[in-house]
Image (cartoon, rainbow, N blue to C red):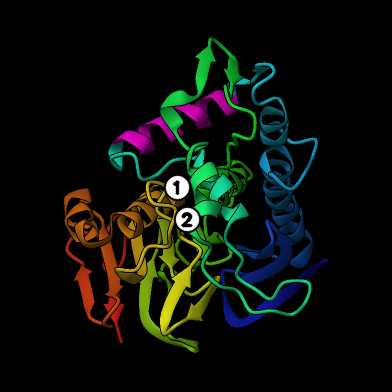
Amino acid sequence: MMAVTHTPQPPVDGIGTWRIRFAAMGGSGEVVLAAPGAAQARRCADAAIAEVLRIEHKYSRYRADSVVSRINAAAGRADVACDSETLALLDYAHTLFGASGGLFDVTSGVLRRAWRFGPDAQGRPPQPPDAAALEPLLALVGWPRVQRDGARIFLPEPGMELDFGGFGKEYAADRAAAVLVAQGVAHGHVNLGGDLAVVGPRADGRPWSIGIRDPRRADALMASVPVSRGGLATSGDYERWFEHGGQRYCHVLDPVRGVPVRHWRSVSVLAPSALAAGTVSTIAMLMQREGLRFLDDSGHDYLAVDAEGRLHQRSAGAPQAGPPGICAH
């Protein structure tokens, strides 16, 4: 399902702003771009959306025919040949594992089997799993155990899994933005569930003003970000969560202990690409208290909210043209 709307703004040299909404990767997305008319806007957006859907089909763990599902189905039995794109993503996963001290681990998706963030079939509310449920799953986590022989990948233990969900949306946003650029689009952005890849400013040269939601009020924004080029991504504890015994449990899981992280409510990062922004924000969430040092060392602008609601901000050298930085409300 797609919807095309024209943003009611004065055109610049005959060019208006168009917003094309679509569904992908388990949520909503949109392509916003400047074009002289609906037909050209739709043609460019369709190509970008097709790239998002291609990546979703290729790497979604929910599709039995995806590369990831084929690797996972062969765990403990056989290796699987991978193409150059998949090998590059595996190389990136290896880099993230090292940069995060082992906390960003694409084999940790198996932990979701123990965690439920909504009512079960009987309507019972979610609750934390016990150690007996986590122990066998933790035994399947460990990126260094993944074996690679040239272009072939092997998961040595039955039940092991790869899951690119930690950076899939951001990768898709960047790839879709590259498709827009290849078609001559100079003004616009791709938004996948709040993770953005921006190809250029508005047609009049002004940056796009992107809102960052308050992690405790779904209908409120806590900041505005002027972005003309690059990526913006947010990781937080508010997308999937439940409360039990007065404690909040979110979907961002520590792969070492198998339990949700607690130190941050949200971490938003501005970087040269959506992929860089998303992985830095996720690693900061996973590092918990040490995440602030990681954010500072990254050199990127950020806005983070800790568990007590305190703001932590760096806005000293935004990578985009136009007004720099993240401006908290």
Residue 202 appears at what percent x and percent y?
48, 68
Name the front one of labels 2 and 1.
2
Where is residue 225 shown, x and y percent of the image? 36, 73
- Quarter of the picture containing the N terminus is bottom right
Residue at 42% from the left image edge and 64% from the top image edge:
234
Q: Nearer the viewer, residue 316 or 257?
A: 257
Residue 261, image x, y percentages: 37, 63
Q: Which residues are magenta?
A: 85-98
The circle on residue 275 is 1
Which residue sits at x=50%, y=61%?
130
Residue 96 in the magenta stretch? The answer is yes
Say whether residue 158 is left or right of residue 261.
Answer: right
Location of the C terminus (image quadrant)? bottom left
Indicate the secondary structure of the residue bearing disc 1: helix
Nearer to me, 269 or 201: 269
Q: Nearer the viewer, residue 221 or 113?
A: 113
